Image (cartoon, rainbow, N blue to C red):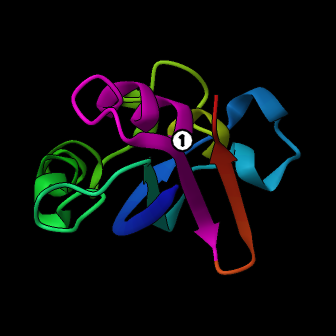
Amino acid sequence: MYKISKQFSFSASHRLDMLGEGHPCARMHGHNYLITVHLKSEELNRFGFAKDYNELKPIKIFITETLDHRHLNDIIPAHPTSENIARFLYERFKPEIPEIYAVEVSETPKTSCIYEP
């Protein structure tokens, strides 16, 4: 099994207002998100790749046009936690990039979440 990954980044705001007024994350705040898309393949293609990284450009375009410098509460259909952002991106890209097996979202250098169904 070959496993590869590619990172993308964006900046955005969100509020986790379901946490209640006293919780700091209930206030609007932002993060510099780091997204890692994990892919796997049992075989290499004729060029020797599990997946050509250039074929992941649609993810970069989507992140830049849809998520970067946006308010995630307006975009993510569930509470915009790292967990829900990871699942949102996985479900958005799995149909067109079947090699994806997990999406990792990091809000800070010390925290991350991996969605892997």
Q: Position of residue 62 (x, y in %)?
A: 18, 44
- Residue with the mark numbered 1: 86
Crowd class of label 1 (few under 14; some 14 to 19; many from 20; radius 10 Å): many
Amino acid type at mark 1: Ala
What span is colored magenta in the figure?
86-108
Figure check: 62 above or below 117: below
Horizontal side, residue 25 vs residue 40: left or right: right
The residue that appears at 54% across and 44% down in the rendered structure is: 102
Is residue 41 in the magenta section?
A: no
106 sits left or right of 33 in the view: right
Q: Residue at x 33, y 27 (%)?
A: 92
Whether residue 1 is visible, yes or no, is yes
The reply to whether residue 64 is in sight is no
Height in image: 84 above or below 33? above
Task: Label 1, secondary structure: give it.
Answer: helix
97 or 79: nearer the viewer:
97
Q: Give coordinates of residue 110: x percent, y percent.
A: 75, 78
Q: Quadrant of the C terminus?
A: top right
Left or right of 45 on screen, residue 38: right
Of residue 59 and residue 51, the one placed in the foreground of this image is 51
Horizontal relation, residue 36 to residue 84: left or right: left
* Residue 87 location (% of width, % of height): 54, 32
Residue furthest to the right: 22
Identify the residue at image location x=37%, y=65%: 11
Q: Is 104 contained in the magenta span?
A: yes
Q: Position of residue 35 (x, y in %)?
A: 45, 60
> What residue sits 41% from the left and 37% below the top?
89
